[in-house]
Image (spheres, helix red, strand yellow):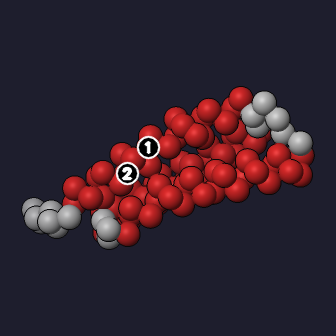
Amino acid sequence: MTEAPPLRWVGILATALYAVTGVFPYLASGLVVPAVALIILMVCWGIGLVFTARLGWTRPLLSLLGVPAALAFWWLFVTAGSELFGWTA
């Protein structure tokens, strides 16, 4: 059995923080975006979760970038939809 790297807890923390973004703001966006857009958002979030978890296993410090990336993607997606398609609450 291999020994865990000393920074493994950073990867676990980064993955847990990323999972929290799935509730807010991603699921909460259902109040603003149409159902199809919410499905697209959640699929992208799921891909990001897998990517962050795998990155947390191999490069724990780099996995910390998952949360800011998820928030930036969410903001860009909702803002673009608001501007292009007129999504409102």
Q: Could you tell me how far apart the alpha carbons at marks 2 and 1 are, in whole angstroms?
A: 6 Å
Q: As displayed, is residue 1 above or below residue 31?
A: below
Image quarter where the C terminus lies is: top right
Image-based side of 70 in relation to 86, left or right: left
Q: Residue at x 82, y 46 (%)?
A: 82
Category of crowding for the residue at label 1, using alpha-carbon neighbours closer than 10 angstroms: few (below 14), some (14–19), many (at least 20): some
Q: Nearer the viewer, residue 47 or 88?
A: 88
Q: Which mark is residue 52?
A: none
Q: Position of residue 39 (x, y in %)?
A: 69, 40
The amino acid pointed to by label 1 is: Ala
Q: Position of residue 50 (x, y in %)?
A: 46, 54
Image-based side of 30 in relation to 26, left or right: right
Q: As displayed, is residue 77 above or below residue 60?
A: above
Q: Position of residue 5 (x, y in %)?
A: 16, 67
Q: Residue at x 38, y 63 (%)?
A: 63
Q: Can I make out residue 76 in this image?
A: yes
Image quarter where the N terminus lies is: bottom left
Circle 2 is placed at which residue position?
15
Query: Is there a contact, CB below 8 Å, between mark 2 and mark 1?
Result: yes
Q: Nearer the viewer, residue 67 or 55?
A: 67
Category of crowding for the residue at label 2, using alpha-carbon neighbours closer than 10 angstroms: few (below 14), some (14–19), many (at least 20): many
Q: Which mark is residue 19?
A: 1
Q: Residue at x 46, y 59 (%)?
A: 66
Image-based side of 19 in relation to 87, left or right: left
Q: Secondary structure at mark 2?
A: helix
Q: Position of residue 24 (x, y in %)?
A: 54, 37
The amino acid pointed to by label 2 is: Thr
Q: Can I make out residue 35 in this image?
A: no
Q: As displayed, is residue 18 above or below residue 69?
A: above
